[in-house]
Amino acid sequence: MKILFINDFDEKGGAEVFVNSLSEKLNEKGHTTQTINPVSEEKYVTYRDRLKKYLQKYFSPFNKRKLRKEILEYDPDIIHLNNIHHLTIPVLRVVKALDCPVVFTFHDYSYFTYCGGYHGEEKCDGTIEKCYKSGEISLKTYLFRKPITSLIKYYTQKAADLVTAPSNDLKEVLEKFTEAEKIPNFVDTEFYQPKGNNRDYFLFVGRLSEEKGLDILLEAYQKAEIDKPLKIAGKGEREKYEKMAEELGIQDKVEFEGFVPEKELPELYSNAIATVMPSKWRESAGIVLLESQACGTPVIASGRGGMREYLRNNKTGIVLEELNSNELSETFEEFQSTNQENYEGYSKNTLKFANNHDINRLSQMIEEKYEELEGT
């Protein structure tokens, strides 16, 4: 079977991990895969006029023709769409016109929402109207985005034979627009497995940005009475958070690791006391949760969005009831003082949970979906 993945992000995030890992696994099983990034970054970023840029983003005839040619040259049996934020409508229009089954996996909420999934502490219902009424976007943005959102909805319904989401939380949002099915995220437990047990530090892995809750993380660490360092791994606004650590007086206890190659991640996870995910926005699932648990390391997380579906409270980690620095600091102290028997219980549960989300089992589920669609 020839499977074509279309994904328009170059930076490595959850969708990119999903596409790359699934592609490799399908190749191992004898299938042929190819990934197309339909975004020409040079052409996209040099548009000077904002309106022209958006029109090109959503309706670009050049990208549409180029994409169609690439797809026809590959001649796939299945087209699997993932992150197509930059050319959503052109991509959907192209695949709609082809005689090929299409799977569309949504990895986040941002096709239909513009607020990170929350209005304050209230969940967004997944509509642009809610974002406007809550003051998240201006009237000008609302009037421009409304028809775009309607077109994305229309072409998704027409083009996709199967729409999937990695969590029930995201699935519920999608079902306001189209039928959807949950297919959980996976982790390669042959690669992500315990590679040490030193438990020398607390760990954050991810993009260094506001929505990931780095400010709450640093404030909580400053308040906590703990003697273990905090390692922060990832790219983003590093200088901003280094300055914040200095202002809080914890610069000597916070280690910014920068980008960590994937081959080094299992060891990094394995030697942590816990991995921390204090996300402010609505995570669809959280690949980091699975990677950490596969290495036997529990997770402390805000539980926003679909993260609660990937974390068993007091078994594979801790779900913060309130996302604030006080509760997180108390959880830091709790983990540092937990006895060995309780900690081993956490580790045993994390490994079991990760094994239930192993890539071999879940890639088989996706493969069966492909076969069903190919046979229709």
Image (spheres, helix red, strand yellow):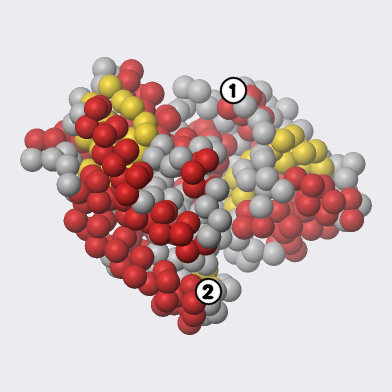
SS class, disc 1 = helix
Residue labelled with disc 1: 263
In the image, residue 301 lies at what x, y percent?
60, 53
Q: Residue at x 80, y 38 (%)?
A: 255
Residue 360 visible in the picture:
no
How far is mark 2 from mark 1, CA to CA? 40 Å
Task: Indicate the amino acid at tag 2.
Answer: Ile
In the image, residue 119 lies at what x, y percent?
54, 73
Which corner quadrant holds the N terminus?
top left
Residue 207 visible in the picture:
yes
**Foreground: 299 or 121?**
121
Q: Residue at x 49, y 47 (%)?
A: 44
Q: Residue at x 33, y 27 (%)?
A: 34
Upstream in sequence: badge 2 or badge 1: 2
Task: Return the mark for residue 3.
Answer: none
SS class, disc 2 = loop
The reply to whether the C-beta atoms of the residues labelled 2 and 1 are less than 8 Å apart is no
Q: On the rendered structure, is 32 left or right of 326?
A: left
| 296 up-or-down from 328: above or below | above
Residue labelled with disc 2: 137
**Foreground: 252 or 137?**
137
